[in-house]
Image: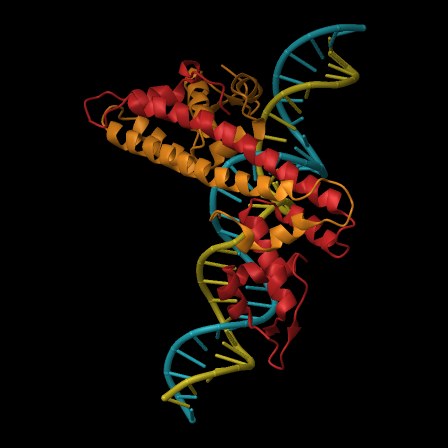
Chain colours: A orange, B red, C yellow, D cyan
DNA sequence: TCTTGAAGCTCTAGTGACTAGAGCAGCTAC
DNA sequence: GTAGCTGCTCTAGTCACTAGAGCTTCAAGA
C-alpha cells in the first residue's frame, strides 16, 4: 500500500496533480485508511505510470481517457489505440514542421540586429510586418 | 475609421480576442462613436497586426507587452528586443528537439501494431512502460 | 505519553489565452 | 419601418494544472 506522496515520488507526478486526475475520473478512487488518507495498490501505481508516460508523449487527458477505457478490453480495440497513437504522431510531426518555419523566421529577424543600441531596431519592424516574411508561418 | 469587425477581418484576429487584448491592456482603448461602438484608426490596426504577427511567431502576450512598451522609444531598447527574440528562438529550437524525440518514440510505438484486431495491443503496453523507450523524452 | 514537524485532507481561486453564450442595443440596406 | 447583421457588456467555461488557506493525521524521537 502506497501513500499519495510515495506515488508522487515514484512516478514523478505531483501530489495535487494526482488528486486532480482522480477528481476528473482519470484515476480510479483509491481506498482510504482510518484517517481518510488515500492508500494505493500496485494497480493505482501502474495506472498513474501509464498516464505519466502518455502525457510525456503529448497525449491529451481526453486521449488518455479513451486509451485507458480501452485498456479494460485489451486487444479488442487495438485498432482504436493505434488510431489515437498515429493521429498523435501526425499531430507532433505537424507541430515540428510549423516550429521549424518559426525558427527560420526568428533566425532571420534576430540577424537583423547585432544587439547594439545604435538605433537599429529592425527586430521590432520585422515583427510588425508579416509581408517581410519568407514563409507562411502561423 | 474601422469597426471592430473590420479590424478582425483585416488582421484575422477574432472579435472577442480583440476585446480581450484591450481588456488586459495590450491594445490601447480606442475611441467610441455615439452608439458606444469601438472605432479604430490606422495605429490601432498596426498595433493589432504587430500582436498577431508576434503571436504567430509564438511570443507570449507578456513578451509582446514588453516589445510594445519598447516600441515607444524605438532604437533605444533594441538590445532588449533582440534579447526577447533570441530567447524565443532558443525556446522554439528546444521545443523542436523535444518533439523530435517524441515523434521517434511514437513512430516506434505505432509500428508495433498493424491496426488489425488480432489481440496484438502492444501499443497500450508500450505506452504504459517507459523503460521500453529508447530516448529520454518528456 | 507527549511533542514536533512532515504529510495529508478539502475547498476555493488563479494561471494563460482565449471561447461561448445570454440578453440586450445600434447600424445598415431594402 | 423592419429585418438581420453587428456591436455591446457580463459571466462562465476551456485545459491542465498550481497555489494557498486552514485544518487533521501520521511517524519518529524524547
Q: Residue at x 49, y 60 (%)?
A: B12
The spot of residue B100 in percent (x, y) is: 45, 28
Residue B57 lies, in percent from the top left, at 55, 46
Residue C18 rendering spot, x and y as whole percentages: 52, 54
Q: In this view, does A75 lie to the left or right of A35?
A: left
Of residues A16 and C15, the one nearer the viewer is: C15
Q: Name the image quarter holding residue A85.
A: top left
Residue positioned 52% across, 70% down in the render: B6
- Look at the image and tell me whether residue B29 can be seen: yes
Q: Which of A27 and A51 is in front in this view?
A: A51
User: Can residue A29 be seen?
Assistant: no
Image point (56%, 44%), residue name? B58
Name the image quarter holding residue B71: bottom right
Q: In this view, does D28 lie above or below B28?
A: above
On the image, the x and y values in percent for residue C25 come to: 55, 80
Residue at 69 percent across and 54 percent down: it is B68
In screen coordinates, is B89 left or right of A44? right
Q: In which quarter of the image is the N terminus of chain B?
A: bottom right
Q: In this view, does B113 lie to the left or right of C25?
A: left
Relative placement, left or right, of A117 versus B61 is right
Amino acid at each position: 500500500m502506497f501513500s499519495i506522496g510515495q506515488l508522487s515520488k515514484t512516478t514523478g507526478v505531483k501530489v495535487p496533480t494526482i488528486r486532480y486526475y482522480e477528481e476528473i475520473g482519470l484515476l480510479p478512487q483509491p481506498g482510504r485508511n482510518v484517517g481518510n488518507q488515500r492508500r494505493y495498490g500496485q494497480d493505482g501505481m501502474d495506472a498513474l505510470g501509464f498516464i505519466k508516460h502518455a502525457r510525456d508523449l503529448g497525449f491529451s487527458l481526453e486521449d488518455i481517457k479513451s486509451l485507458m477505457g480501452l485498456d479494460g478490453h485489451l486487444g479488442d480495440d487495438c485498432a482504436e489505440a493505434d488510431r489515437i497513437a498515429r493521429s498523435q504522431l501526425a499531430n507532433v510531426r505537424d507541430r515540428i514542421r510549423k516550429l521549424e518555419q518559426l525558427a527560420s523566421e526568428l533566425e532571420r529577424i534576430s540577424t537583423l540586429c547585432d544587439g547594439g543600441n545604435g538605433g537599429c531596431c529592425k527586430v521590432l519592424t520585422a515583427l510588425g510586418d508579416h509581408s517581410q516574411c519568407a514563409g507562411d508561418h502561423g
